[in-house]
Image: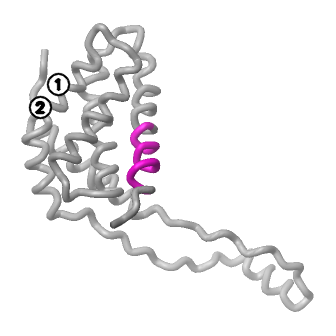
């Protein structure tokens, strides 16, 4: 039985997208540590003091998720979510083949690229990952045959890893022009 997209589905996806955006914005690149120098008697006291006292860290400003895009994404979900739910359910129904799982990422990626051309880069990747995870967990996993259900988490990881690999291979290396 095909389930249809609800307002609760859209709200859950928007919330997960905002959380993913915050998570991305809070990741900090840590620079490599400088080479260790042999302490002199003068610097030994400074090193001892810095070990016992916590270092002060600069504050980090976290950019909120772009609220303007929520309206665009809501419209996109209203238009495309029923088709994406059906795709997730079709993949999980018999005859089920493990190789079909990656197709969900492809279907979602194509829908986002066609339906939201203004969403690009890391924001598009985050939206695709959020959508795939939501569709997989809510609509595909319950339909998996009993022999595949123990592997649902591993299959989800496979899908998300495939999305990340495709992003690194095609999107990040694509020359900007």
Q: Quadrant of the C terminus?
A: bottom left
Work out whether 18 lies above or below 129. below
Residue at (22%, 45%) from the top-left corner?
112
Residue that label 1 marks = 86
**Spatial CA span between label 2 and label 1:** 6 Å
Residue at (42%, 26%) from the top-left corner?
155
Q: Is residue 165 magenta?
A: yes
Magenta-tinted stretch = 162-172
Is 111 situated left or right of 30 in this image?
Answer: left
Could you tell me which secondary element the residue under label 2 belongs to? Answer: helix
Residue farthest along the bottom direction in this orientation: 42
Q: Is 42 in front, or is 17? A: 17
- In percent of width and height, residue 32 lies at 66, 69
- In percent of width and height, residue 39 lies at 88, 82
Quarter of the figure with residue 172: bottom left
Tag 2 near tag 1, CB within 8 Å: yes
Q: For the stretch drawn in magenta, what is the main secondary structure?
A: helix
> Residue 169: which numbered mark, if any?
none
Is 42 situated left or right of 25 in this image?
Answer: right
Work out whether 25 lies above or below 151. below
């Amino acid at each position: 039985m095909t389930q249809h997209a609800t307002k609760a589905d859209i709200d859950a996806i928007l919330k997960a997208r905002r959380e993913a955006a915050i998570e991305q914005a809070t990741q900090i690149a840590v620079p490599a540590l400088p080479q260790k120098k042999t302490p002199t008697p003068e610097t030994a006291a400074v090193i001892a003091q810095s070990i016992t006292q916590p270092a002060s860290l600069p504050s980090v400003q976290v950019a909120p998720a772009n609220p303007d895009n929520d309206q665009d994404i809501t419209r996109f979900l209203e238009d495309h979510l029923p088709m994406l739910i059906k795709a997730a359910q079709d993949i999980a129904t018999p005859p089920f083949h493990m190789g079909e799982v990656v197709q969900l990422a492809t279907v979602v990626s194509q829908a986002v690229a066609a339906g939201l051309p203004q969403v690009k880069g890391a924001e598009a990747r985050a939206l695709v990952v959020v959508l795939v995870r939501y569709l997989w967990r809510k609509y595909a996993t319950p339909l998996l045959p009993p022999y595949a259900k123990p592997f649902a988490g591993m299959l989800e990881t496979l899908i998300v890893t495939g999305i990340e690999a495709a992003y690194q291979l095609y999107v990040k290396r694509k020359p900007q022009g």
